[in-house]
Amino acid sequence: MGAQPVKLNKFSTAGILITLGIIYGDIGTSPIYVMRAIVGGHTISRELVMGGMSCVFWTLLIITTFKYVYMALNNDNKGEGGIFALYALVKRYKIRWAIIPALLGCSALIADGFITPPISISSAIEGLTILNPEIPTVPIVIVILTALFVFQQFGTQVVGSVFGPVMTIWFLMIGTFGAIELFRHPEVLIALNPAYAVNLLVNYPGGFWLLGAVFLCTTGAEAMYSDLGHCGKQNIRVGWVFVISMLLLNYLGQSSYLLQREGEYLDVDASPFYALMPEWFLPVGIVIASFATIIASQAVITGCFTLVNEATKLKLWTNFKVVYPSLHKGQIYLPAINWFLYFGCLLVILLFRKSSNMEAAYGLTITIDMLMTTLLLATLLHLHRKKWLVITGFLLLFLALEGSFLASNLLKLSHGGWFTVLVASVIFTATWLFYKGRVLRRKHTDFIEVGQFIPMLEALMADKTVPKEATNLVFLARVDDQNKIDANIIYSIFRKRPKRADVYWFVHVDITNDPYGASYHVKTLIPKKCFVVSLRFGFKVEHKVNFMFNQIVADLMANGEVDEESRYPSLRQYGFPADFKFILLKSRVTTDDKLTPWEQFVIKGYRLVKSLGISRAEDFGLETSNLRMETIPISIGRSADIQMERLD
């Protein structure tokens, strides 16, 4: 992640090292609180410890390893992963309902961004209370979180190179202490037998509801798939062999420690994780744990940035300001989302205060996201014509497992789970209204054949009684194809104040289902006088329409297709270029419409979400000095039925 970054998605030792620092932070710091969440608040028993350990092992094996490391990584969108990559793949087949799991998964992941940094950092810092029970941990956590979010604007270019080594030290540390404790009580290895997991769920009182705590061991699995484009399939898979080995050693070590204290009561704030460390090493262990949880939080934050940016490019969310703080292509910073997450994290800290309380709010929304990924993956398997037995088996297995995790997590609703569900619900409602608003507007946007208005355009060009608007008039257009044009543009040129120009450009920006790539196509409607330009961007590519349009004009000039010297003799003799004016059209529902309550709700919601973002001019990267914004009325409802009577 330095100034000259390596290609992370290429398989290499450096790639594996950096992968450890990018995607394994969340799942890698889970041992701090998972066994405490399972056993805490209970009397330690062999049945509970062995059953809990067995559940953790099989969860990591089936969900994390089989579903994500094997199945999900094999279904990428040209090297990119995540819920929107899956949606983009399914969308190609015109599967309309796919938008629902995509938006639900996105909402759940952003809600997770509220809870992961606080619980991760709190669980590490609370280790200080072992050294001194009077240490106030909440202010320390708030200071660390504040510094973390303030630092986002500078990017991770400077410190990113140390993430991998720090996480490597972390995994070696937890694996070593786990192995030492395991050797003292090696019979805990028989907990890998799934019979112990079944016994816990079936026979232990309230055993099924412990699945909500077990699920915490796999909450970072989605990051492996989401960050596929940054790290590469082979780096993730090879890195996972090392990571799961260290995780299992630590979980087994904690289980061994707990079995040696069978019959004792484990307080909900106790830490079997830190209990594995000798007292002399504890300060060092807490420092390393703190750095590891900060790195885990960083991964979640940047993941949210990427997620929102992808949603914007897929036209599923309004445009936010995007900053590129480093030379690395994948590093972005969204100020609005950064501070939204920051205040959300502060609220979590102030509401729950301790990591043991946050555990109740953690995991529920991630279960929902995993279920949505399962649905989209199964749909993709069907579209790829996989055998029905494979698809049915995949669905039954993961709907049963993740459905069980969801059911057990529902118990958390009244204990804090309501918070993340509320956040996810608000985000989903906003994204759904924005999507439906776009659909409604698109449905009532008319397109006309280009050939119908060319004679009118030629007549306007020749009409010297109409003042000239500009030499080159550029309209940002929505078109179904290059043979049609948005009727709003015709309205703007002819029905409002007529806009005469020497050259007309109709530029359409099309966001493709591919993550990267930028290309263009030009269709000449009137030689040297009227062009339709189609710009095609991958959904992860930054919009720089002004810059790219200048390149296109230069290409056309070089080919002799357009003359772009000034049309004014006084300026032309000094070599001045022709002037350009960009026109951006903003459609708004006419006041004459009579809308249904649902249409009114959708439009108001769409406008509210739209107001949160930046302007279309900023999104397209257009200079404001040669730009005009125009509002065009559109009709999407029934005309108001009002009969006027003339009075004498």
Image (cartoon, helix red, strand yellow):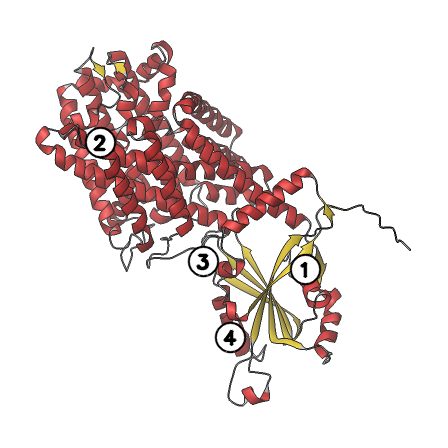
Q: Is residue 387 left or right of residue 111?
A: right
The answer to whether residue 61 is above or below residue 560 is above
Q: How many residues crowd around disc 4 within 10 Å: few (fewer than 14), some, or many (20 or more)?
A: some
The mark that comes first in sequence, 2 or 1, is 2
Question: In x, y percent, where is residue 448?
Answer: 72, 59
Vertical placement of 227 versus 469: above or below? above
Question: Which residue lies under the disc numbered 1?
Answer: 488
Name the residue beneath numbered marker 4. 554
Classify mark 2: helix, strand or loop.
Answer: loop
Q: Quadrant of residue 434?
A: top right
Residue at the disc numbered 2: 126
Q: Position of residue 419 (x, y in %)?
A: 42, 31
Question: From the image, which quarter does the C terminus lie in?
Answer: bottom right
Say which of marks 2 and 3 sits in front: 2
User: Is there any visible trace of residue 3 in the rendered image?
Assistant: yes
User: How would you rate the neighbour count of disc 3 (Cα within 10 Å): few for under 14, some for 14-19, many for 20 or more?
Assistant: some
Single out the mark in the foreground, 2 or 1: 2
Type of amino acid at the residue the image marks with label 2: Glu
Tell me which amino acid carries mark 4: Ala
Q: Nearer the viewer, residue 34 or 322?
A: 322
